[in-house]
Amino acid sequence: MSQFLRPALSALDPYVPGEQPQDKRYIKLNTNENPYPPAPGVMDAITREAVSQLKLYSDPTIAPLKQAIADCYAIKPENVFVTNGSDEALGFAFLAYADGSHPVTIPDISYGFYKVFAQLFQVPPKVIPLREDFSLPVEKFCSAGSMVVFANPNAPTAIALPLSEVERIVAFNPEHVVLVDEAYVDFGGESALSLIDRYPNLLVVRTFSKSRSLAGARIGYAMGNPALIDDLERVRNSFHPYNINRLSMLAGVEAMKDTAYFEDCCQRIMKTRQETAKALIALGFTLTESSTNFLFAAPPGISGKEYYEQLKERGVLVRYFGTERLSPYVRITIGTDEEMAVLLSKTREILKEANP
Ligand code: PMP
């Protein structure tokens, strides 16, 4: 750190992403990527000709991708905001609606970036603890009195909130933006998208990183009332108008168009999740009910940390968080059936050694 850094930034705890080894040494079940490749049309769209066009700036209106998203969800392009990963959508929303005198209400256990953005933008966070069973205390969010941000389904707990409960939170906070982060909704959650016409304060944030197999392309989006989208465009155009590169735009359009491929991948992942959950429960694990592409799982007889370390030694990476309430657990991304078979066999080995 240099002597020039602003004090507010020197005190910041930046987000720590899950390990991203760039070789193939591990079965990687730690950052909730999709084990299946992007839709076939994506591969065909990245031609030499497309690459040669990288000499030109990308389209700052992001019109083709907005249109593809709008077509997919039967909304209008004016309802759609597109960003470089959904992290950027979250960041722009914080910039648009929160500051030192406009706090944000967030759950204590959720996506770690919410707290980081609050620190970065010097927004006082109002942190509401999840209940003992990791469910969201909806009443407390109904009387938030500030912008509200939460993930549904939540991460790393994997638990989904029914749409009726999400609607209560949105309806009880008409003076404030309620941002529902639906990064994992395609794996069994109920989306709040159907509510955007009725609630001018609702912003639904999604990503191409999970269900569309495009984590490396960095595409996220937000959907909401056109006035909210206008706000976010003001921020984007004051910060980074070329935030979507040409190749990601092509990839995103193709991924959005191929509904059949998308649905097939999600179904396969949900089926593998169900089978893996059953096998882990049979081994004595404690699991939450997952509506995501990962399992939040506590092994029997050993700590989350030990299980994580033992798996890593055996070539399987999962995510361990280490905070007090999360320390018995790890988060396991659903991979292919073959990858999950390896996870299960390594797990049996570890448990046998730990509890001979
Ligand atoms: N929201 C949640 C709940 C997440 O888990 C993630 C991914 N780690 C994101 C948003 C951000 O994803 P991306 O920037 O890849 O779209």
Image (cartoon, rainbow, N blue to C red):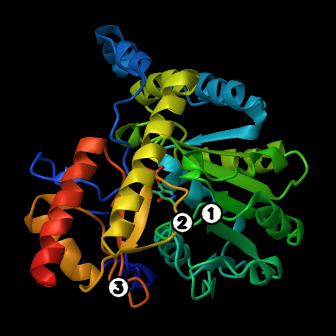
For the view shown, which residue lies furthest in the top direction? 49
In the image, taking residue 53 as reference, residue 108 lies left or right, namely right
Tell me, yes or no, if residue 20 can be seen here.
no
Displayed quadrant of residue 131 = bottom right
The residues bearing labels 1 and 3 have C-alpha atoms spaced at a distance of 21 Å
Residue found at x 32% / y 17%: 51
Give the residue type at disc 2: Glu
- The percent coordinates of residue 8 (x first, y second) are 45, 83
Residue 160 has which mark? 1
**Camera-side residue: 234 or 204?**
204
Give the residue type at disc 3: Ser
**Camera-side residue: 319 or 106?**
319
Q: Earlier in the sequence, mark 1 or mark 3?
A: 1
In the structure shown, which secondary structural element does the residue marked by tag 1 occupy? loop
In the image, taking residue 195 as reference, residue 316 lies left or right, namely left
Q: Mark 3: give few (<14), some (14-19) or many (20+) Cα within 10 Å.
A: some
Q: Earlier in the sequence, mark 3 or mark 2?
A: 2
The answer as to whether callout 2 falls within 8 Å of ligand 1 is no
Residue 289 has which mark? 2
**Camera-side residue: 338 or 36?**
338
The residues bearing labels 2 and 1 have C-alpha atoms spaced at a distance of 8 Å
Look at the numbered discs 2 and 1 and tell me whether their residues touch, using CB distance below 8 Å.
Answer: yes
Residue found at x 67% / y 44%: 233
Can you identify the residue that label 3 sits on?
327
**Camera-side residue: 159 or 279?**
279
- The percent coordinates of residue 38 (x first, y second) are 39, 29
- The percent coordinates of residue 337 (x first, y second) are 30, 43
